[in-house]
Amino acid sequence: MASSKKLPPADLAGHVENKLKEWHVSGRHLVLALSGGADSVALLDILAQLRASLHFTLSALHVNHRISPHAGRWAEFCARLCAGLEVPFSAVEVDIAHQPGASLEASARAARYRALAAQTADFVVLAQHLDDQAETLLLQLLRGAGAKGLSAMAEVDMRPGRSIQGHGPEPAFCEGNVGSALLEPTYIRPLLDVPRRTILGYAAWRGLEWVDDESNADIAFDRNYLRHRVLPLLEKRFPGYRETFARTSRNLAESAQLMDDLARLDGAAALAGGRLKVDALRGLSEPRAKNLLRWWLAERGVPMPSSGRLENILQQLRSSRDDAQIAVSQADAVVRRYRGEAYIEKKRAEPQPDTALTWSLQDRLDLPDFGGALIFERVMGRGVGLAKLTAAPVTVRQRRGGERLRPDCRRPSRSLKNLLQEAGIPSWQRQRLPLLFSGDELVFVPGIGTACEYQAGEEENGIVVEFKAVDGDAESNGG
């Protein structure tokens, strides 16, 4: 096979075939992200040819951003194209939530990837190519990105828990924090080392038709400005810049991997239950502390802060007084510190003081205002005595102040405030704890336990109550 730089258009299908064999797609379900443009149409044509010989199932998804007045026509074109190839097709319309400080391009990309992540497939196939990679590297460089950002796109982008055969776990269902869900598909880019001119040559050779997005010519968008104004000049002087940029991205990807490996080593002693020990940050050099903090944020799904923002978070965690109340916002999360540990929490509104939900013996009670769910497991001789609990209406609500509880039968009742402080539950979490009541009597508090008077005897039917937070915070049960 010729190198991708000199790849004849007629050999493009064979190039993609070799990539798919390497990624062991046999027996898997592939979903192609189909925009209707030349790149994704060419890839659809190739995948439709290969599905029988490589034994994979194929479908296509069109994401309609509803930005262009022609968007509806593009979706119809994609539907007709797939019908002609007997490829199952679906289209989804997305709302672009334009975040402050984010470009329209970034908002559209985020919406598109949310739609792709929701697909019940093993692989999502993307038609991004070598020219896209060069543009991405330049954009990231102009934004001051670090090694991870400059490593640009990967041919194989595995979500947590995913893998390709021979490189880790197989795609499967897994248990999440609340219930089970299908893991996010693995993203593959079989054209990433192929110049766009080769793809266009293939499309012309095959007589394919496609649609053109008029916004691609609008140089008000940064990527288009680079594509139409900057890169043509660069090519005149450095015709091999695409391959050089791709090699740079691969080198930086290796550097980013080494940085992640170092962060995991540092994190082995610095992490406890997803929380980061501040003393461990203080004991590291500035670059290693930043690297660990950056990795910790990424592992918890927090969008990467700017360099200045990251320095501010690190400075507040390491330098503030131990009793200082720290709350630094980053995207949809808040970084806090409590008793020498840093926490990450998703932003959410506080529960309404009068919110009270009734428990009607179901196994699970969803509590969106509290950020999780209560799980009820029926057992014998443990947890909350079922008969005692249900002697009066059972409700769930938040703290209102003045509550008392006696979880230890050898000791008198104590104020809930003192019990929560002793248990080390951070102050901002206390108001969002769901309290379980029987009538007006407080029965159970997550992280504290069950009132002595309501604990199940050895021969009694009991209920073990467990609070599971949807953002991965610590679980609490009634024992």
Image (cartoon, grey):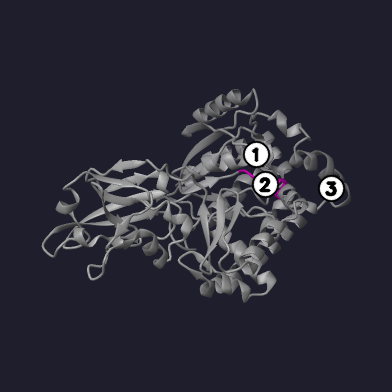
Q: Callout 1: helix, strand or loop? A: helix
Which quadrant holds the C terminus? Answer: bottom left
| Of callouts 1 and 2, the N-terminal one | 1
What type is the residue that disc 2 sits on?
Answer: His
Residue shown at the point (21%, 43%) measured from the top left: 393
For residue 39, which numbered disc appears in the image?
A: 1
Mark 2 and mark 1 in contact (Cβ < 8 Å)?
A: yes
What type is the residue that disc 1 sits on?
Answer: Asp
Q: Residues within 10 Å of mark 3 (few under 14, many from 20)?
A: few
For residue 129, which numbered disc appears in the image?
A: 2
Q: Is-magenta flag for residue 132?
A: yes
The residues tagged by marks 3 and 1 sit, at their Cα atoms, a distance apart of 21 Å
For residue 225, which numbered disc appears in the image?
A: none
Toward which corner of the image does residue 1 lie, by quadrant? bottom right
Q: Give the residues in magenta.
A: 127-133
From the viewer's side, name the closer residue of 412 and 279: 412
Q: Position of residue 70 (x, y in %)?
A: 64, 23
Residue shown at the point (18%, 48%) measured from the top left: 390
The residues tagged by marks 3 and 2 sit, at their Cα atoms, a distance apart of 17 Å
Residue on which disc 3 sits: 235
What type is the residue that disc 3 sits on?
Answer: Glu
From the viewer's side, name the closer residue of 407 and 370: 407
Q: Which residue is outermost to the right?
A: 237
